[in-house]
Image: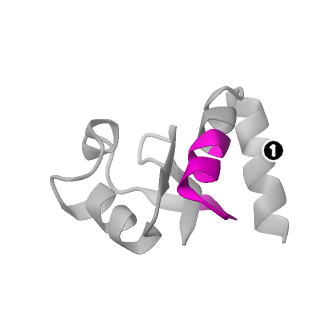
Amino acid sequence: MNTVYILKCSDNTLYTGSTTDLTRRFRAHNEQKGGAKYTRARRPVIVVFKEECTTLTDARKREAEIKRMTRKEKLLLIETYEEE
């Protein structure tokens, strides 16, 4: 499944990414060298938002949209997701 996701890092910052396998990618962010350089220094991370997309291209477009959001907008998106 193609997923766009937001992680909350240990320093309370947010990281947005997309993947075809969220379980594998989450594990990489927390345990392996394969995680993003940004999250390696901010472990542990937790998934606070995820959205399934039809294609990886769609997931990457959505990732770009989210990355352009302000922190406040991202927090509102996360809050809406948590309520579902």
Q: Nearer the viewer, residue 39 or 24?
A: 24
List the residue tagged with mark 1.
Answer: 76
Mark 1 closeness class: few <14, some 14–19, many ≥20 residues within 10 Å:
few
Q: Position of residue 6 (x, y in %)?
A: 57, 51
Q: Is residue 24 magenta?
A: no
Q: Position of residue 36 (x, y in %)?
A: 30, 43
Q: Is residue 55 magenta?
A: yes
Q: Nearer the viewer, residue 34 or 79?
A: 34
**Element on which disc 1 rests:** helix
Q: Position of residue 27 (x, y in %)?
A: 31, 67
Q: Residue at x 15, y 52 (%)?
A: 33
Q: Is residue 31 above or below residue 79?
A: below
- Quadrant for the N terminus, please: bottom right
User: What stretch of residues is rendered in magenta?
Assistant: 48-62
Q: Is residue 22 above or below residue 63?
A: below
Q: Quadrant of residue 5?
A: bottom right
Q: Nearer the viewer, residue 71 or 4?
A: 4
Question: What is the image's colouring?
Answer: one colour
Q: Quadrant of residue 28?
A: bottom left
Q: Position of residue 29 (x, y in %)?
A: 32, 56
Q: How many dots with numbers?
A: 1
- Quadrant for the C terminus, please: bottom right
Q: Residue at x 84, y 67 (%)?
A: 83
Q: Amino acid at mark 1?
A: Leu
> In this rendering, would 52 be left or right of 27?
right
